[in-house]
Image (tube, rainbow, N blue to C red):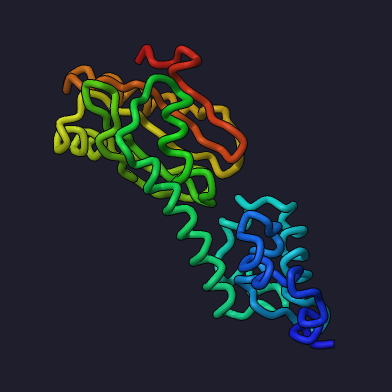
Amino acid sequence: MEEGLALRSWAEEDRPREKLLLKGRHELSNAELLAILIGSGNRQHNAVDLARVILADLGHDLGRLARLGPADLAKHRGIGEAKAVKIVAALELARRRVSSRTEEKAQVRCSKDLDAQIRDVLCDRDREEFWVLYLNRANRMIHRERISVGGVSGTVVDVKLIFKGALERLASSLALCHNHPSGNLKPSEADISLTRKVIKAGRVMDVAVLDHLIITDSGYFSFADQGLLEG
């Protein structure tokens, strides 16, 4: 049976699009929301069942879904290039919505506040990225900037670029942040060495280093919390 006929046989209030219109978006499951983006399924699965298959393959982890590219999604029968691009675009809009909210000048008082200011751009990355948050004297974020992008296990960081951004924005302090796509929260020797180098340069430039966070999908590691900012 074709997918369109299968969904039409459902009660109107149970069809994803109609359900959203009748009851609101909050009443839909993740599979139903994804099904709306998919639109139609294949000979074996209607759109909702296909969405359930995709989510099941990902362990129902929306973070993993957000990391997929069009080619990854198109591996599922019934997901062509156009559908895959639509899904990726919708997830990127959702990420940017969160990003626009966190770019407000929130005050950073602890590692948890810092995590809240950077998690949206680092938690779904499959490559290592290094970011810097620049703050004013009140410890409010002025700007955040990506300094480098690397591979799965590392990235090269130029300390001069870190302080170029600090000088351009007259920052009083900064915080270093990077992700570990592997999920390992333990800092590497390179992470520790870089942190010490930035701290020493910051003392010369009169720019304090508040913390260095390592971000994973499951949590974060704070150099400040662990007493590793002695430089």
Q: Considering the image in quadrants, where does the N terminus appear?
A: bottom right
- At 55% from the left and 80% from the top, the residue drawn is 82
- At 27% from the left and 39% from the top, the residue drawn is 143
Q: Position of residue 33 (x, y in %)?
A: 64, 63
Q: Position of residue 37 (x, y in %)?
A: 60, 71
Quarter of the image where one finds residue 159: top left
Considering every residue shown, the one lying at the far front of the view is 22
Foreground residue among 175 and 29: 29
Foreground residue among 206 and 18: 18
- At 55% from the left and 65% from the top, the residue drawn is 69
Left or right of 221? Residue 4 is right
Rendered position, 231 above or below 23 = above
Q: Considering the image in quadrants, where does the C terminus appear?
A: top left
Rendered position, 13 above or below 104 = below
Quarter of the image where one finds residue 6: bottom right
Foreground residue among 8 and 150: 8
Q: Position of residue 133 (x, y in %)?
A: 32, 34
